[in-house]
Amino acid sequence: MITRTDAELVRDVQRGSGSAAEALFDRHWPRAWRAAYGVLGDRQRADDAAQTAILRALERIASLRDGGAFGPWLLRIVVREALDGRRRTRREAPLEAASDVAASDAPDVADPALADAMRALTPERRAVVVLHFWLGHPLPEVAEILGIPQGTAHSRLSRALSQLRTHLEVPHGR
Amino acid sequence: MAADLEDRLARMADAAQPGHAATARARAAALDAVGKRCRRPGWRRLMPPRPVRSLAVAVAGTVAIAAVLALSLPRAADGPPPTAVTLAATNPAPGGTVDDGALRTAADMIDRRAQIMGIDGADAEVVDGDIVLRIPQDAPAGTLRDLTARGEMAMYDAARVIIGEPNGVPSRPSPGPGQRVVSVQDAPGGAMNHILIRDLPSLTNADVASVRVEEADGDLDASLLTATWTAQGRRAAHALTRSVAQAGAIRGGLSAILVVVDGELVSNPVVDPERYPDGINSDTFRIGSVGPTYPRSQRLALAAQVQEGPLPVVLSPAG
């Protein structure tokens, strides 16, 4: 089986290929959803934000010159959509307890204390944590996805970790 | 604490997976969107933006929104941006105090404004009772001012609130209780006039869910700012536009609806009473246009301020 690259899939979607769009969706949806969930802390709102973002990405895909950058580009749209969504609702939704999750879904919160600490972060700091620790992006990529300089990403991550450790009473400096 | 924080974060991430139903819905929507576009002639070339559900308000006057942006936002924090600026905060209410919560909120709002404006590297944090704002050296001129302006937006029914001369007077009047002064500049570089109004806003930042900046097409060589309302905002906007339409739109000059940001008139759209005799009942509303001679950063600044709402504090350079 030949695995097509993102660049090839994006090119095919730009030419109108539905199967390429399907392949792109399957490849990137889980990470897009996870990013939205990490920022929003709510499954339903993550569903909405991730779906809106992926539709928006497909809508604008003709403007994407470097198809190989589809993943970070999509994540940037997802995070912005999630942050905008949070502002729209103007409320902070808690990370749900496992018992609140639909039976068909896997429980998300095996670590309620950490979920509580994450909830206390600002969405911008949460976004850095999610992109770096949940999705595994190095800080330079996190900075690029969020449209901030590396120094800002680094300082936000440092502050976020410090805040998490304080919340969890983990000794600083590990 | 036995488990390492980073390991715990990684395990938390592993447990976060989208549900099957949500995945199926999103997949169907995505494929449907692509399919529809593929069936549309010329879609690849055009890739039109999402349809604006209501561009119902005729933008009258374009009232030098950018001139206002360029000249009217608070001056205290203006000038070439240094790498880091320490900003002292005061409560906008006379005699009020400033607590850490308000400072943190303001810092977070400034961060979000910077993100919306695309100012890479701007970062605000609370330090010893002040806000320290770092701005990259290559940020556009006026970035400091745009990030730290209070950003208080209000929309008024002009016919109901204007007291006295609707085109304003050159000398700034003294407002009485429940009144405020709105400044307006008819053209870039032109003189400021001042209008006395009753401070009875029909809509404020709290009614705005988001603001979009888009390039105008057709004859309007400008960028357009379009607000999406909250549910409450939609109802209030409908009531406002109905009132304006039924009163009959006043043509030209200061008429119909006043869009005011930080005491400056940034736009005065009118409602076409023939087209919308019952007002405009829509999620979206075009609140103004910005001429092409002004930097995009200033257009985005206004959008960010209107969307994010007013800072809870008034900021000025410390010392």
Image (tube, coloured by chain):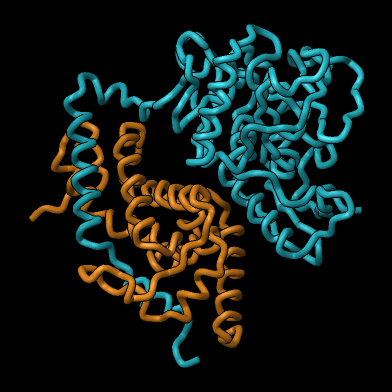
Q: Is residue A5 visible?
A: no
Q: Residue at x 62, y 37 (%)?
A: B306
Q: Residue at x 45, y 33 (%)?
A: B283
From the viewer's perspective, tell me whether residue A65 is left or right of residue B101: left
From the viewer's perspective, tell me whether residue B59 is left or right of residue A133: right
Q: Locate residue B291: give its quadrant.
A: top right
The hue used for chain A is orange
From the viewer's perspective, tell me whether residue B134 is left or right of residue A135: right
Q: Position of residue B105 (x, y in %)?
A: 67, 57
Q: Is A170 located above or below residue A135 in the figure? A: below
Q: Position of residue B54 (x, y in %)?
A: 43, 24
The hue used for chain B is cyan
Residue closest to the eye, B84 or B162: B162
Q: Residue at x 56, y 57 (%)?
A: A150
Q: How many marks?
A: 0
> In the image as oriented, which residue stretches furthest toward the left?
A1
Q: Is residue A104 visible?
A: yes
Residue closest to the eye, A29 or B193: B193
Q: Locate residue B23: give its quadrant.
A: bottom left
Q: Position of residue B113 (x, y in %)?
A: 62, 45
Q: Position of residue B55 (x, y in %)?
A: 46, 21
Q: Is B252 located above or below residue A47 in the figure? A: above
From the viewer's perspective, tell me whether residue A151 is left or right of residue B55: right
Q: Residue at x 17, y 34 (%)?
A: B35
